[in-house]
Amino acid sequence: MNYTDKILPGEPHPLGATYDGKGVNFALFSESATGVTLVLFDVPGDDNQYKEIDFHEVTNYVWHAYIPGLGPGQGYGYRVDGSYHPESGSRFNPRKVLLDPYARAIEGRIEIKDSMHDYTFEHRLQGNIYEKNDADSAAEVNKCLVVDTVFDWEGVEKPKIPMHESVIYEMHVKGFTATHPDIPEAERGTYIGMTNPKIISYFKELGINTIELMPVHHFVHNKFLLDNKLSNYWGYNSIGFFAPHAEYSASGREGQQVNEFKEMVKTYHRNGIEVILDVVYNHTGEGDHLGPNIAFRGIDNQYYYHQDPVNHFYYRDYTGTGNMFDLSKSQTLQLVMDSLHYWAEEMQVDGFRFDLATALTRGAEGDILGSGFLDAIYRDPVLAKLKIIAEPWDLGPGGYQVGKFPAPWSEWNGKYRDSVRRYWRGDEHQLKELAFRLTGSKDLYEKSGKLPASGINIVTAHDGFTLHDLVSYNQKYNVKNRENNRDGENDNISWNSGAEGHTDNPEIIALREKRKRNFLCTLLISQGVPMISHGDEYGRTQHGNNNAWCQDNETAWMNWNWSENQKKLFEFTKSIIALRKKLPFTHCQKYFENTPGKEAGYKDIRWINTKGKDMENSDWNSRLNRCVGLMLPFHPMTPSEIHKGTSLNSYLLILFNSYWEEVSFRLPHGETSLKWRILADTDNGKTIESEEIYTNTYQVQPRSMVILKNVK
């Protein structure tokens, strides 16, 4: 085909490669480029055969052309020309074939090669990193693929689960099914593997109604990792903000990852389960100033990245990855918003968790709230209907913003995690903060008009110790990451329960199992939205590695061969999730007021001490006090019911004891004698309503909690 005879001007929008049934419209933004060349790869698998087409149409910095006859499966990339002055931030090099930022699909696994850099390693070793590298990267760079977006959703709609009713499960697409014995080997670790009936049944049995996928945007495998025979397992190194990661495709046919991802979402929606994406827009897989020219750096480095204010060869870095995406620029912000819309509308996902979200708000000077990103989210009618969750921190000045993201944002509640960990470790003086965390972190969210569901309660997540390791290690063990154990968090607020790592001591094993139950039970009865990190429901271990981002192996994968203790922990977790769903007080839409009704003397929440009396200041302020009781109505009452003095005779009582000895709690009686039955006890792991009735006292065992229900 002689493409030069068929080129038409095309349109500047939409950006990317858009197939209309007759041909493809190509559109690429670059404010500073002096020339753009489309590179078409005609023979699949032969990277040396390609055609080049120069663009001549430019509209508002968008270079565009339309080519009739092209269709789905067409491989392509761009060469972008302009000045090469790295010291001033300009790094155009037309010898590098670049990925389209709007590509809907990218082929294969991206491994960084020397030819992808705009400077040579020889010059780097000589100290001259401003010398241009003329090697052509066409044969080694991954190609973008034109896709047809037509897909039959069969009328399946989004579940639209209210945020306060969500039980979120954070997971990794590959790691979750990589070793599952009931999934065909070719489908393990893929989007299709995630649709297996065994996996769907697992989530439904456990009680999960929302899964949060770790990054599925097409990502890069860092050169450092490849040199050390590792890989970027977690995927927090995005390069294709519209493209599902190709390595999770079961078919192996390039471009099929798009439909396979859609099939996965449709399957989960059909089963009443939502799908949230963990998205990484704060930086890209091109890395720091010594990284490759894969896409944004070669298309318009000065535009897409926050430049160092002194030397533009370097980047302002508040992400710890070497670069930071600049959302204070209108087109960069538009790219992120277009990406979100694509995943929400075309791919039908139900929400987003934003990695290092504070970085997305930073303006041209690195100032928080300077980018316009929060306003764009707030004003967007499509995104307003979805779950929008911030990881509310980055590594820059003032970056810890827990409680400060405005509505409609929810947040990973890092203060919940730290408070619950400290309390169950047995730290002193923890009760006051624990009370706020158990009841929805009113102190963090109420002033900005947000509700308890604004807090995503976490005890563990992908980043840090697993739950099993939290109770089994005092220190991290990350040597396998090849960074001399320097990576990963040092202060994990963990305790090994009496022995470091693996032990055969039955007493220590029993204590660890109980402590896991404490964490899970606390998480699942707290106000706010609980998030379980994959595998914690049965006690997955990473053997002390608290930063398994590069461990694409059994270290980080789910292990489906469970011990008896792991089976018991799964059953306990399942039972507590079911209990949560039966107890409306655990996911109220409003905060508890802790105020008595005008006529009934009723309180919507009551804190009691071991004497069965209301907690006093001396109880809250005691440095050594590690015990508290929380008494709640079994069914929350509306303000009008409280005002009218509606009678209430059904209560729940939760008793906490992080002391290393058993503690006797006097059970509250109120105006009439109350009788109590046990619903759950983390000491023995029982979650079946007991037949035995307690009227006066209950002995809460060391380092355990109990849930009781009154009986008439």
Image: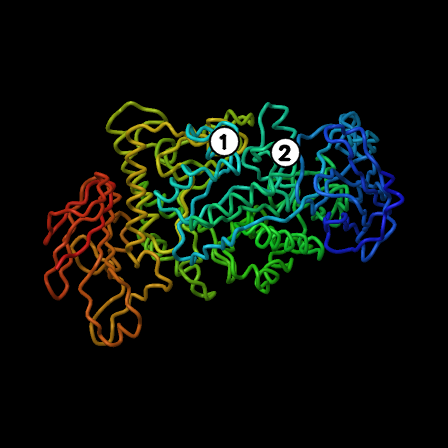
Circle 1 Cα neighbour tier, 10 Å, few/some/many (<14 / 14–19 / ≥20):
many
Which type of secondary structure does the marked residue at label 1 adopt?
loop
- Taking 550 as reference, is 393 above or below it? below
- Taking 701 as reference, is 303 above or below it? below
Which type of secondary structure does the marked residue at label 2 adopt?
loop
Camera-side residue: 25 or 117?
25
Question: How many numbered dots are placed on residues in this image?
Answer: 2
In the displayed structure, does residue 287 sit left or right of residue 159? right
Which scheme is used to colour this image of the protein?
rainbow
Camera-side residue: 255 or 20?
20
Classify the position of the N terminus by image quarter.
Answer: top right
Residue 68, image x and y in percent?
80, 47
In the displayed structure, does residue 440 sit left or right of residue 355? left
Point out the tag, 2 or 1, that comes first from the N-terminus. 1
Classify the position of the C terminus by image quarter.
Answer: bottom left
Residue 704, image x and y in percent?
24, 42
Q: Looking at the image, which residue sits at the far right?
A: 5
Q: Hey, what amino acid is under mark 1?
A: Arg
Circle 2 Cα neighbour tier, 10 Å, few/some/many (<14 / 14–19 / ≥20):
few
- Taking 124 as reference, is 444 above or below it? below
Q: Which mark is residue 253?
A: 2
Q: CA distance from mark 2 to mark 1?
A: 16 Å
Camera-side residue: 329 or 26?
26
Q: Which mark is residue 188?
A: 1
In the displayed structure, does residue 625 sit left or right of residue 459? left
In the displayed structure, does residue 457 sit left or right of residue 10? left
Residue depicted at x 15% and y 45%: 699
Q: Hey, what amino acid is under mark 2?
A: Arg
Residue 629, image x and y in percent?
23, 54
